Amino acid sequence: MIKNTSRRNFLRGLSAISPLCYFSAHAASINPKIIKTPDYFKALGVESFINAVGPYSSLGGAKMWPEVIEAMDYAITHKAKMADLHNATGKRIAEMLGAEAAIVTSGATGAIIQGTAGCMTMGDSDKNERLPDTTGMKNEVIILKNQRYLYDRSIRAPGAILVEINNLEELPNAINKKTAMLFYLLNRPDIENIDIETYITIAKHHEIPIMCDAATTVPPVKRIAATIKHGFDLVCYSGGKGLRGPYSAGLLLGRKDLVEYAKQHGSPNHRAYGRSMKVAPEEYLGMMIAVETSLKYDEKAEFNRQRKTVKFMQAQLAIIPGITITINQPDFEASEPYIEIQWDKRYQITPKELKEKLRHGAPSIEIRALFLSQGNIHLTAVMLTMSEAQIVVQRINTILQKSLIES
């Protein structure tokens, strides 16, 4: 935790921005225990919001486990050599998750960059030094065309070239002497055109590493071990979503030699291509404790809590005439139930307009990005308390009724 003296210094710096009266210095001098945490967001003019989406990166991620915060606090005040801590936490994480090896990275994106770099250079120090110039080395990564996504530029960052295929029938012809890696996005399976086991088998037959982005597939945590057992050579995860660790951290798990090659491309190595994607000591330790805590957590109880909140929102909204509410649960992404809201033409408002009104109301409410929800309104309960869920449904009801009145 931040020391009280640090908080006071911080507040002195902010005093030039706006008046701050969040705790009494006089009361603190009489009884040091009576010190409230300052409202930093208010002091900075930053608005809090109700999160009806989930642990999105742009919304700050999930709440870290208290155990993670305690461990990070320890690492801030107790120092160790970075290489030693990097190796030790990676070894422990691998043991807990049933992987040959693991490293803590700067998020899932950092894991993809380092993993791709490792598969292209395969531990060759001369090639390591040349990145992102991949001239003359294996630098092609095969990806399914319908699995292209926002973060695939992370594959290209260290100098890889993406080669698209439409289905498995095209895979053998796409593989050549320049193929460095195959890539698979686990949360977007193409049931008609891709069979995971066959995809992996072909990669193994040609002795080409295959990486899996499974960043958003937790909880349940047991999926991590299952994904590794599929046979992927490398698998990456976000640290601050379902694992509830430090949000700027992530994991790269898999084959020991490839993880070691990937490790060469990150800090604390001084000349690594990914040196700028630095991981702090508190993140190494925090990520290890996040895995440990997640493995012990009662995920079923948390799922039931979310389900109860989602059903509450469904019941409250279903009484509105012309509204259709369905409860869904993703098959391949994190096990987080959500409701989908649709309405008939009597309401003169689009999903985009409703989303904007929720965002710009008081309090601000964030819902799932429409491009991820196929243009529909989705609400999850991952980050919601029951009282916040009540506010969300009341606001949606008010906005829809206003639209109906003005039509």
Image: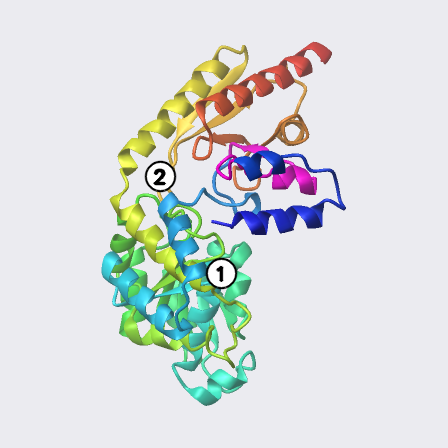
Numbered marks: total:
2
Residue 335's disc number: 2
Label 1 sits on residue: 109
Image x and y of residue 218, in percent: 36, 46
**The magenta stretch spans residue 70:** no
Q: Amino acid at mark 2?
A: Ser
Calculate the distance from the C-alpha at mark 2 to the C-alpha at mark 1.
22 Å
2 or 1: tag closer to the N-terminus:
1
Front residue of this view, candidates 30 and 321: 30
Kindly check if marks 2 and 1 are in contact, taking CB atoms under 8 A apart as contact. Answer: no
Mark 2 secondary-structure assignment: loop
Q: Which range of residues does the magenta coloring cover?
A: 31-52
| 397 vs 40: above or below | above
Q: Main secondary structure of the magenta part?
A: loop
Q: Who is closer to the viewer here, 79 or 286? A: 79
Residue at x 26% of width, y 57% of height: 97
